[in-house]
Amino acid sequence: MSAVEILMVGRMPAVVERQLRERFTLVSGSDASDEALSRVRGVASGAHAPVGPELLQRLPALEIVANFGVGYDSVDVACCAERGIVVTNTPDVLTEEVADTALGLLLMTARELSASERWLRAGRWARDGAYPLTRTTLRGRTLGILGLGRIGKAIARRAEAFGLKVMYHGRRRQEDVAYPYFETLEGLAAACDTLMVVAPGGAETRHLIDAKILKALGPEGIVINIGRGTVIDEAALIEALKAGTILAAGLDVFEHEPMVPEALIGMENVVLLPHVGSASQHTRDGMGQLVVDNLTSWFADGRPLTPVPETPVPQTPVTV
Ligand code: 8YV
């Protein structure tokens, strides 16, 4: 055990806490005094645990925040960058898992798989006959991906195998893919009928999908969100689903997790998952290990393995 003090905030797999206890001196978040926090040099930040200005201000000796998750919108990266604090995330290790979930959610939504299972479990197959034919199908659909990063590309590969046409919009055109690129999200929404949201959270992407985009998607439109709930204006989505502006939605993420609007829960044309994109034991352990490895590498030789782009260190990320 080293004398380096690490603060763990939020939920984290057991594999993280055990190794952090072996390698560092672990400080518990809830009851730590200012004096104890003043010695903390690293933070391991888990789910639903914002690392904002208030906490950062109590950590004058902080060198690194190792975030559990590829998305790091809960960490104030600008404040960290100003103070020279390194931020790391957990890319790559969850890519395929999240892409699997995205395709599962798309299939569940287009083919009403959870509704048809509810039909069987309620005894309606034997009582009322076959589940009604689904209003739509994946056949002939065009998938527009918002955010063609590592996860977006893994989703695109799967979608191609399913016979879907793929196109995308993002901050920039990707040179390593041949999928059609759209300069605007509205242009993408008008050209496709199935919108896959893989964009990260934060101020830049907040409510990118609003009433105008949903209208452009059209009455056969399906929206799948596997990125962050804040990217979609949830109230506008509910209106669009009610009015038939779009056909259906499959959501793994929400604006105010774990709260999900009653209006969505009451709808038949939506599939709702409790943010399980990466949530297998295998993948969460891999993400947890990367949190531990980032902290270990930083305190052993000053080299974070997977720094986020905003972080003030030479960008030499290692793919694990
Ligand atoms: C996790 C995620 O649910 O990696 C992310 O950004 O959203 C998910 O993999 C999240 O890290 C909270 O545990």
Image (cartoon, helix red, strand yellow):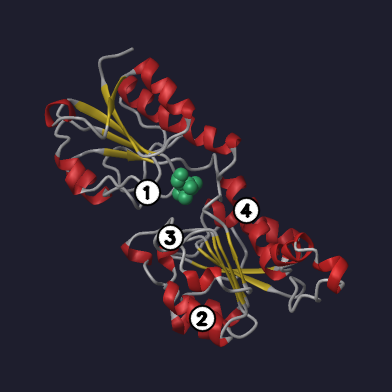
Distance from label 2 to label 3 (Cα)? 23 Å
Place of residue 41 in the rendered image (x, y in percent of width and height, measured from the top left): 23, 28
- According to the picture, the residue beneath numbered tag 1 turns out to be 72
Amino acid bearing label 4: Thr
Name which residue lies at 45% across and 74% down: 209
Amino acid bearing label 1: Tyr
Mark number, residue 101: 4
Question: Above or below — where is 80 with respect to 19?
Answer: below
Amino acid bearing label 2: Leu
- According to the picture, the residue beneath numbered tag 2 turns out to be 214
In front of the other: 34 or 188: 34
Amino acid bearing label 3: Met
Distance from label 1 to label 2 (Cα)? 27 Å
Seen in the image, is 15 located left or right of residue 67? right
Question: Above or below — where is 97 with respect to 235?
Answer: above
| Mark found first going from the N terminus, 4 or 3 | 4
